[in-house]
Image: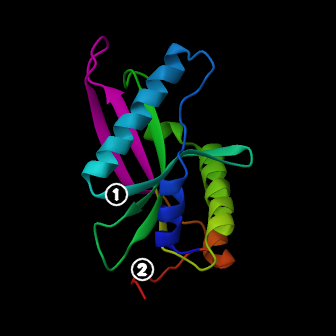
Amino acid sequence: MTIKELIAKLCRKKQSTENTKAIHAKDALGIKGEKLAVNHLKEKGFKIIGERVHVGIDELDIIAIDFSNPMTEQIVFVEVKTRSSNLYGGGKAAVDKRKRKAIIRAAKGYMKANFSKPHAIRFDIIEVTKAEPHSDTFEITHHINAIALPKEIIASGLCKTDLRKR
């Protein structure tokens, strides 16, 4: 499946991100952070192709296509970390080895299920942090290529290491 075919398929299929269960305060903060991250990416020219995508037991917060450089369209897997403060460290620090492995496993499964040929991919982290404890203002920090492309994905043939479009 090509990127354009995937976009067309997803545009036809309404994706529901609403959860019918009661949402706890922490969950609500996380969902708000993900929505802010989606808006941030759209403002930067990204095309969102998936939100809260489940692949097996794992979840990918956001899947987007970065069109900022027409020569290197990339599929971007974005992990969003929302914090009410940086008191206990930023969101990027919370993406530990176990979480990175889960993101990579999910991305690999997603690529296998949706693409027949390799595409340029990368892994970003977006930190969304409340500016002040009782404020509705948030600060967004976008870490591009925050997770190194693992050798196992390169070896699997699921991604291109030469980022030039062909």
Q: At numbered mark 1, what does the secondary structure look like: helix, strand or loop?
A: strand
Residue 114 placement (x, y as % from top left): 63, 66
- Image quadrant occupied by the C terminus: bottom left
Decide: is 37 above or below 122.
Answer: above
The answer to whether any part of residue 55 appears in the image is yes
Decide: is 133 above or below 20.
Answer: above
* Left or right, residue 164 beside residue 136: right
Provide the residue designation for mark 2: 163
Q: Quadrant of residue 113?
A: bottom right
Q: Which residues are magenta?
A: 124-146
Amino acid at the residue labelled 2: Leu
Farthest residue toward the top?
134
Amino acid at the residue labelled 1: Phe
Q: Quadrant of residue 105?
A: bottom right
Residue 84 placement (x, y as % from top left): 39, 21
Provide the residue designation for mark 1: 46
Which of these two is toward me, 142 or 75? 75
> Which numbered circle lies on residue 152?
none
